[in-house]
């Protein structure tokens, strides 16, 4: 167990260092987040009531659309330098999946937090406290799904499929997360739904990933 955790931690730390050393995914995604929220504010404005009503869903839309370019980088660095097969041989599927999901979860949480802060400032809509657990839960499932699809869809010829398959798979996070982040709506049932979504997404990813690595 300790060996598995160490291996997963090493993979996650490697992903973080790759991003810091110039992969620049967040350098592309975060300006996209800002641009999307500014455009949404212009599109739905200037009625304050409308802006407040749509604010809980905008961070989730932003996370889902940001997951598509992030998915392209799940195994891109390893494939570009020819080390993907070596990595698969050195690290078992479970720790490899856990490490990549942990790193991507960090990026998606960062995107979500940035979107919540920017939308609260631009749209003048303060989020409820439930947005914190909702964001952590929803982005975990999206991270697991993104790693799975990012591993399967590895070539530029098929990268257009990512949006087609990834966005519908993230709909439970969009729906439940939006409701949990709406001040007038009881958050507990929607948080429970996000927990169930996490369990299903992580379990399916854990079961499928060893077979995906064999392709």
Image (cartoon, rainbow, N blue to C red):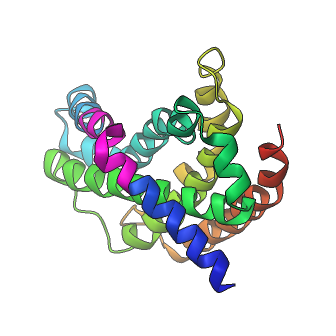
The residue located at (68%, 32%) in the rendering is 165
Residue 163 included in the magenta stretch of the image: no
The x and y percentages for residue 86 are: 66, 46
Compared across the picture, whether 80 is left or right of 213 comes to: left
The single residue placed furthest to the bottom in the displayed view is 2
Q: In this picture, is 43 found above or below 47? A: above
Looking at the rendered image, the quarter that the C terminus falls into is top right
Reply yes or no: does residue 30 show up in magenta: yes
Residue ID at (40%, 62%): 181
**In which quadrant will I find the N terminus?**
bottom right
Q: Is residue 190 visible?
A: no
**Which secondary structure type mostly characterizes the magenta part of the structure?**
helix
Tag count? 0
Which of the 4 quarters of the picture holds residue 191? bottom right
Percent x, y for residue 75?
Answer: 57, 40
Residue displayed at 49% across by 62% down: 12
Any part of residue 146 in sight: yes
Viewer-closest of 149 and 199 = 149
- Range drawn in magenta: 17-32
Residue 13 in picture, x, y percent from top left? 43, 63
- In this view of the protein, which residue sits in the foreground, 87 or 169? 87
Residue, far top:
157
x, y (%) of residue 207? 83, 59
- Please say if 73 is above or below 1: above
196 sits left or right of 111 in the view: right
Residue 190 drawn above or below residue 152: below
Q: Is residue 86 left or right of residue 181?
A: right
């Amino acid at each position: 167990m300790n060996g598995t955790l160490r291996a997963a931690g090493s993979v996650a730390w490697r992903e973080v260092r790759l991003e810091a050393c110039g992969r620049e995914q967040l350098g592309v995604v975060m300006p996209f987040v800002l641009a999307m929220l500014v455009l949404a504010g212009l599109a739905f404005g200037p009625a304050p009531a409308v802006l407040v009503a749509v604010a809980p869903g905008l961070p989730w839309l932003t996370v889902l659309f940001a997951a598509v370019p992030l998915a392209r980088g799940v195994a891109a660095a390893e494939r570009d330098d020819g080390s993907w097969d070596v990595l698969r041989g050195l690290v078992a599927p479970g720790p490899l999946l856990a490490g990549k999901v942990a790193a991507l979860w960090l990026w998606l949480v960062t995107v979500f937090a940035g979107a919540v802060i920017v939308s609260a400032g631009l749209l003048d809509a303060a989020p409820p406290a439930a947005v914190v657990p909702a964001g952590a839960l929803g982005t975990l499932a999206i991270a697991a799904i993104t790693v799975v699809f990012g591993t399967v869809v590895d070539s530029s010829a098929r990268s257009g499929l990512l949006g087609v398959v990834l966005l519908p798979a993230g709909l439970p996070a969009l729906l439940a997360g939006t409701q949990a982040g709406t001040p007038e709506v009881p958050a507990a049932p929607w948080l429970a739904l996000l927990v169930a979504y996490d369990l299903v997404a992580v379990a399916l990813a854990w079961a499928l990933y060893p077979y995906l690595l064999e392709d």
